Amino acid sequence: MSTAITTKDLSKQPPTSPRQRVAGFVIAARTTDKCRASMENKLGEYHFDCPLDNALFSFKEITADQFKSAVKAAKTYEDIGHWLKTNGKSKTDSEIKAWSDSTEAGTLINDPQKRDYFIENCKKVGLDPQKATIFDWLEADDRASFKK
């Protein structure tokens, strides 16, 4: 089954959850949504090539411009997954899983430079910053931003 990439208007709906994996990579679907939206001037308050996107780019040793070219050519999320598997630094399935699992479990509570920001923003969306992951916070923030 192939999942077509459609350009989301991120001023009206959030990008895909960072947990949604594409070929095993967390963040990839969300980064794809933001990249596609940036090409159509539909990013809303989101940012492409942000620190979260750069976690994926760094892991694969690719650039935002390379990823953008792949997104331009892709018709499906599976196309992006194939591109990620075959471009940048080669990674085994177990390396991808370990990185994705670690990234999904990540938090900013222990980062002295980002701790206060994380605590403040977790509290804004009703999360306990001591227990919340970055992904918990992003999803809660997405829900809060698009409440009807």
Image: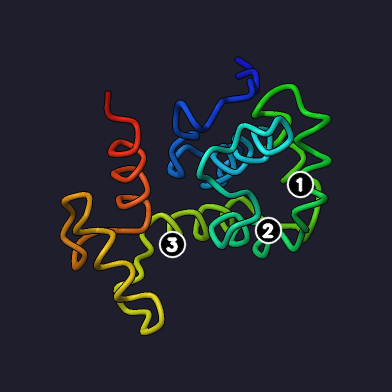
Q: Which residue is mark 2?
A: 57
Residue shown at 77%/40% (left/top)? 83
Closer to the camera, 111 or 90? 111
Instruction: Please name the amino acid that badge 1 sits on.
Output: Phe
Q: Which residue is mark 1?
A: 67
Q: How is the image coloured?
A: rainbow
Give the left or right position of residue 111, taking residue 92 as reference.
left
Depicted 110 relative to depicted 48: above or below? below
Question: Does label 3 or label 1 sit earlier along the sequence?
Answer: 1
Estimate the x, y position of residue 145 in percent, counting from the top left: 34, 38
Q: CA distance from mark 3 to mark 1?
A: 22 Å
Q: Nearer the viewer, mark 3 or mark 1?
A: 1
Q: Which residue is mark 3?
A: 102
Estimate the x, y position of residue 92 in percent, counting from the top left: 66, 55
Q: Nearer the viewer, mark 2 or mark 3?
A: 2
Disc 2 + disc 3, Cβ < 8 Å: no
